Image: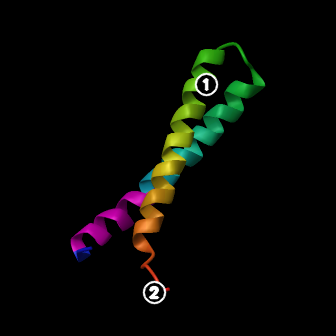
Amino acid sequence: MSLANLALISQRLPELRAEHRALDQAIDQLAANPEDELELKRLKRRRLHLKDCITQLENLLIPDEPA
C-alpha cells in the first residue's frame, strides 16, 4: 500500500469516528423520545455501516504479520 493511501486512510478515520459519535448522540436522543422509529432504525443502520468502514480501514493500517 502506498504512502498516499495510508495518509488518506489516516485522514478519513477521524472523520468517520466523529460521524459515528454524532450518530450515537442522535440515537440516544431519539431513543429517549421514540416518536420516529423509522428514523431511529435508519440512524442505527448508518452507525453500523460506519463502524464496519472504520474496522475495515483500521485493518488496512495494521500490517500483516507472517505466520
The amino acid marked with disc number 2 is: Pro
Spot the residue most to the bottom. Answer: 66
Identify the disc placed on residue 41.
1
The amino acid marked with disc number 1 is: Lys
Pick the residue in front: 18 or 45: 45
Relative image position of residue 31 (x, y in whole percent):
73, 27
Query: Magenta segment: does it hold 10?
Result: yes
Relative image position of residue 9 (x, y in whole percent):
35, 63
Quadrant in the rendering for residue 6: bottom left
Relative side of 21 to 61, left or right: right
Query: Magenta segment: does it hold 12?
Result: yes
Pick the residue in front: 32 or 54: 54
Relative image position of residue 14 (x, y in whole percent):
45, 59
Task: Indicate the secondary structure of the residue bearing disc 2.
Answer: loop
Q: Earlier in the sequence, mark 1 or mark 2?
A: 1
Task: Indicate the secondary structure of the residue bearing disc 1.
Answer: helix
- Span of residues in magenta: 4-14
Relative side of 64 to 35, left or right: left
Q: Residues within 10 Å of mark 1 (few under 14, many from 20)?
A: few
The total number of labels drawn is 2
CA separation, marks 1 and 2?
41 Å
Residue at point 69% right, 30% down? 29
Relative image position of residue 7 (x, y in whole percent):
30, 70
Relative side of 6 to 16, left or right: left
Residue at point 68% right, 25% down? 30
Q: Nearer the viewer, mark 1 or mark 2?
A: 2
Residue at point 60% right, 16% down? 38
Principal secondary structure, stretch drawn in magenta:
helix
Query: What's the image's color scheme?
Result: rainbow
Q: Relative to residue 28, is residue 32 depicted above or below?
A: above
Query: What residue is pinned by disc 2?
Result: 66
Q: Quadrant of the N terminus?
A: bottom left
